[in-house]
Amino acid sequence: MQLDNRKKEVLHAIVDDYVSTNEPVGSKSLIERHSFNVSSATLRNDMAELEHLGLIEKPHTSAGRIPSDKGYREYVNSLMTIEQLTPREQLEIEKRIDSSIDEVTDLIKNATHTLSETTGFVSLAMSPRLKKSFLKQLKILMIEPGKALVVMVLSAGVVKDKVVRIPNFLNDEQIMKISGAIEKHLTGKPLDEITLVTVETAGKNTDVPEPLLKQVLYEAYAAIKQADELNIYLEGEHRMLSLPDFSSLGRARDLLGTLSDSGMVAGYVNEMENAAREAGSDDSYMIRIGQEITLEGLDDCSFITATYNLTDSVSGNIGVIGPKRMLYSKVISQIDFVKKKLNEEMKKFT
Amino acid sequence: MQLDNRKKEVLHAIVDDYVSTNEPVGSKSLIERHSFNVSSATLRNDMAELEHLGLIEKPHTSAGRIPSDKGYREYVNSLMTIEQLTPREQLEIEKRIDSSIDEVTDLIKNATHTLSETTGFVSLAMSPRLKKSFLKQLKILMIEPGKALVVMVLSAGVVKDKVVRIPNFLNDEQIMKISGAIEKHLTGKPLDEITLVTVETAGKNTDVPEPLLKQVLYEAYAAIKQADELNIYLEGEHRMLSLPDFSSLGRARDLLGTLSDSGMVAGYVNEMENAAREAGSDDSYMIRIGQEITLEGLDDCSFITATYNLTDSVSGNIGVIGPKRMLYSKVISQIDFVKKKLNEEMKKFT
DNA sequence: GTTGGCACTCGAAGAGTGAGAGTGCTAATC
DNA sequence: GATTAGCACTCTCACTCTTCGAGTGCCAAC
């Protein structure tokens, strides 16, 4: 994208003005609000050029211009500068982070809540991707005949459990044996290396009769697999209704309808994460603007995520879905700061 | 409320028509759609009377009438007849109930989901009130130095756990002792009879040094208390945006804003439950209409809940928040049917 | 490359209008 | 006394028309 300096400034100004006023910006108001040392006619020429390049567009013939997705993209990639939050803003966030929390999940929910409150948009977080974390403990507790609880402690201090059905005849002692055998063989193994075969091998040398054993092993395997399933936490959907960008009911409905399918959103976040990883991106945040987002109803949104780390190998995402027309630099630093705080809290655990 | 038969029929017809058309209903259209053997002028007189009684009202002078909250109330209390769901409708619901679920929480979520899908409104469920359930097992598992997991098995097959901090110096054996002592003394006790004092008494005769012991006991107590905290599950908020009743953005925003504070909604459900209990109501459902609901932004809603039973003494609520202008009898039978199915699934556990 | 000037476009907002649905009231009827 | 026909009146909704203003593109001049 070859843009001379003034054109860059014009695009910058158009984005800024449009973000703050929510009105298409015309050449004249541009002159009024900024100190360009040229006339409005000149800016009109520049704007015609920017429009040709697809960076801005007209809602209709006789209105001002608004940034296109491509324009926002250019703005985000090359024009804006990200400023640190003021101490006051930092404090505002720190106040909301609850550092007395003992469980990773609650910590993440707390961060999500904080992010939604500070940005005023929808915030979301993914649970940590635990595939790379390894098993530290696995216990099977009898609850009652036919029912047991598989408790797993993973590296990174995460505890997972699952109620499973087991054969009625099995007694406490047998379960203990199986549980001990599994734990002995699988401790230290990353979750993504544990397969049904591994679990079955681990349980082999217990003297529990074959078919019963097999069922328990299968259930244990299922519990382990469930432990690395991803969860997503979404918050603040209702805030979108207060934004002028979604004052059309249809738009709001489409947006909230899509967001209500949290599995779909989770899938998309994963896609973003994978894409960034493949691209070897070293940005501290990922961003998708408007039509770049392949979820229905998010054409007028931008999706920004960052990656938090529970341990070196275990991470997850936290981010925001807001209107395209947002203060990118501010929101990015807010996400970044919340992420930083979250990382700090998580370090306490490990 | 003294209403002669025809006036009752008129009110009934007005509610029905308004619910199905979403338009104020006038005397003439009333005649057209129903077989009253009188003229429209007569109905006009009746309607004037109904308006005097506060059962119906005019949006403006020259429009038809719509039911007031009081009118809906009369309709719900005395006029409507609740019909069974058709076999087809029942099947539709049964298809959505997943009977392979092993955990109470998932069962409840599944029922909530089903209810939202079948009614098209917001559905909600409260987790079971476990105060009356008793402790069947309590184990404390060491996770790592300074950290343990308290696992509780309650009557009714519910499993709860909580990660707690414990003194670093404590070893596996000491924890086992404490855990064993607590379990021995508290097994069979309903949760609401367990206090910090009870727990401390239970732990007395272990030979673990005093201050350390005290901390563990406190944490165990906290875990037990946390076990009977109520959760609420809300689903389908976005569906409200598709209803003509909330086509005004302001209304929709207020509604979703309130619903986003799930704690507040949970509190209100509890209030309803308590009120019904005090009144010794034997209805299978509770209902609040419009302004009867003390939550902000729900003036145009009705709130219907029913009580499911996990065991004889442990129950919770499940219900729907929809527009006042709803097919009450249909929705009530839907809730009732889902509740019935939920009860059946829960019976399998106990 | 920049500028002033000008004709043109288009949407938003406001005023005016007519149609339609509904009401309340009155006087006559059963 | 309840019911009815008739009628004048009210009020909203949908439409059209108009004006206003902001903005544009283009051209000729600097």
Image: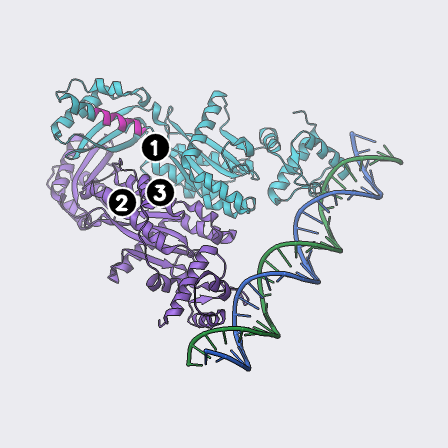
Chain colours: A cyan, B purple, C blue, D green
Numbered disc 2: secondary structure: helix
Q: Picture quarter containing residue A58?
A: top right
Q: Which residue is mark 1?
A: A348
Q: Residue at x 62, y 32 (%)?
A: A71
Q: Can residue A274 be seen here?
A: yes
Amino acid type, residue under disc 1 in the picture: Lys
Q: Which mark is residue A9?
A: none
Magenta residue span: A216-227
Q: Is residue B110 inside the magenta stretch?
A: no
| Mark 2 vs 1: CB contact within 8 A | no
Q: Nearer the viewer, mark 2 or mark 3?
A: 2
| Disc 1 with disc 3 on a shared chain | no
Q: Is residue B4 above or below residue B318?
A: below
Disc 3: CA contacts within 10 A as few (<14), some (14-19) or many (>=20): many
Amino acid type, residue under disc 3 in the picture: His
Q: Which residue is mark 3?
A: B113
Q: Which residue is mark 2?
A: B341
Disc 2: CA contacts within 10 A as few (<14), some (14-19) or many (>=20): some
Q: Residue at x 46, y 38 (%)?
A: A258
Q: Is residue B184 above or below residue A214?
A: below
Picture quarter with the N terminus of chain A: top right
Amino acid type, residue under disc 2 in the picture: Lys
Of residues A216 and B306, the one drawn nearer to the viewer in this rendering? B306
Q: Residue A152 in the image: state x and y as whole percent.
A: 25, 29
